[in-house]
Amino acid sequence: MGTQRFTVEVVRLTSAMLGEGFVLQRFVLGPINTNTYVVTDPEGGVAVVIDPAPGASEALTPILKGFEGKVIILITHAHFDHASDAARLRASLGGPPKAVCVLHELDKSMYRISEGAARWFGAEWEDPVVDVYLTVREGVEPVKPLREEGVAALAIHVPGHTPGSVTYYFLDARAAFTGDTLFKGTIGRTDFPGGDPEAMRESLRRLARELPPETRILPGHGSPTTMGRELRENYALKQALEGDES
């Protein structure tokens, strides 16, 4: 299989991403143009990778190989375009304690589906090697590996696109990595295996409750937005929030 093409965009979310000096990079990778995010600390404390898409190991290993601190790989959900390179990236960085991977336990059920989808798109799939399984059910809990590194982040369980979809909310930065649950102008699909329209509606209501309007939304595909903008302008989101009131 040939090398997958990717583009790189470097952006800053706020004057402080998880603390002064942190830098967010967005890598658009794989056959479905997935956003893989990397948050790095120039002080060498911790780097966070969100959703290692096809091609992520090749793109990120040169950047992170010399990083002196810990690398934490967060997977929002286990579809192939978000998780296919998790195992390869973890291995290329030496595994624990240097590199650890986090996924919700309910998305283990997605592995065989993702393997087939990856084959269809001409991508490679390897089951993620997960060090920390999240167990939160339709609620919110701290992300333990990040808490141990002094980073304040929450895992918000948002089933609907997949049973174990998670939004990672970084409190200090007011930034949320929403995977395929919430996008600029639309919401995630629920017609794939494991999808659940009612669960998606409840998950979107949960995000509306948990995320302040100024929260920067960093989705799995497409451009960043804010929670406030989506509450005002995202018709699909507004429909979900009003569904039980009509």
Image (cartoon, grey):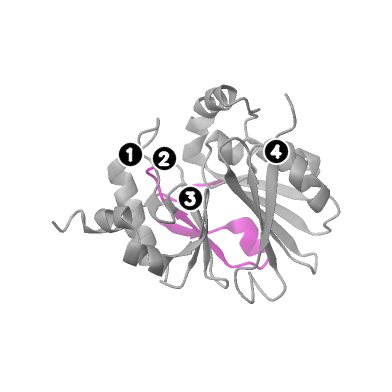
Residue for badge 1:
196
Q: How many marks?
A: 4
Is residue 117 rendered magenta in the image? no
The nearer-to-camera label among 1 and 2 is 1
- Amino acid type at image mark 1: Asp
The nearer-to-camera label among 4 and 2 is 4
The nearer-to-camera label among 3 and 4 is 4
Residue for badge 3:
166
Q: Secondary structure at mark 3?
A: strand
Q: Earlier in the sequence, mark 1 or mark 2?
A: 2
The reply to whether discs 1 and 2 touch (Cβ–Cβ < 8 Å) is yes
Q: Which residues are magenta?
A: 133-160
Task: Give the Cα distance between marks 1 and 2.
Answer: 8 Å
Residue for badge 2:
163
Q: Earlier in the sequence, mark 1 or mark 4?
A: 4
Mark identifier at residue 122: none
Q: Which residue lies at the image location 84% right of the left edge and 58% below the top edge? A: 68
Q: Earlier in the sequence, mark 4 or mark 2?
A: 4
Rendering coords of residue 4 (x, y %): 70, 34
Residue for badge 4:
5
